């Protein structure tokens, strides 16, 4: 019986810590709907759907991202995000980090 407790205590501890990490991640993904804004960013270097997917995936990994629509034909990326969690500079840095060049950025209507 004593061996069982020695085994169960670390297991219980790991389970509790896992739940805390999941809760912290869930909390970081809560969006403040009053702070959601949409911006259009000009992007150079996109040439195909794969480029669009790369940018969309990278931005959606940011906490506070709501939606992303990249269009290589127009060279534009529309991003909807929580302004309390993301700044435009971070969006541009994320795009640039994937090998593209972000340019002008303006608030979408």
Image: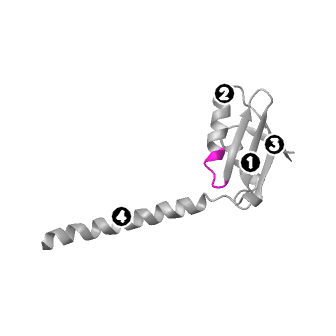
Residue 89 is covered by the magenta coloring: no
Q: How far apart are marks 1 and 4 (CA)?
A: 35 Å
Which badge, 4 or 3, is on the more N-terminal residue? Answer: 4
Q: Residue 49 carries which label?
A: 2
Q: How far apart are marks 4 and 3 (CA)?
A: 43 Å
Q: Quadrant of the C terminus?
A: top right
Mark 1 burial class by Cα count in 10 Å: few <14, some 14-19, many 20+: some
Q: Nearer the viewer, residue 34 or 92?
A: 34
Q: For this view, does 66 lie left or right of residue 76?
A: left
Which residue range is magenta in the image? 59-64
Q: In which quarter of the image is the N terminus?
A: bottom left
SS type, badge 4: helix
Name the residue beneath numbered marker 4. Answer: 15
Q: Residue 40 carries which label?
A: 3
Which badge, 2 or 4, is on the more N-terminal residue? Answer: 4
Mark 4 burial class by Cα count in 10 Å: few <14, some 14-19, many 20+: few
Q: For this view, does 50 lie left or right of residue 79?
A: left
């Amino acid at each position: 019986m004593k061996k069982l407790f020695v085994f169960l205590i670390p297991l219980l501890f790991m389970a509790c810590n896992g739940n805390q990490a999941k809760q912290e991640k869930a909390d970081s993904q809560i969006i403040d709907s009053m702070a959601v804004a949409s911006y259009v960013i000009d992007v150079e270097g996109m040439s195909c759907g794969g480029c669009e997917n790369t940018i969309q995936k990278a931005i959606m990994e940011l906490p506070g991202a709501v939606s992303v629509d990249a269009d290589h034909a127009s060279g534009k990326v529309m991003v909807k995000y929580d302004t309390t969690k993301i700044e435009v500079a971070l969006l541009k840095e994320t795009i640039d980090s994937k090998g593209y060049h972000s340019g002008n950025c303006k608030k979408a209507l």
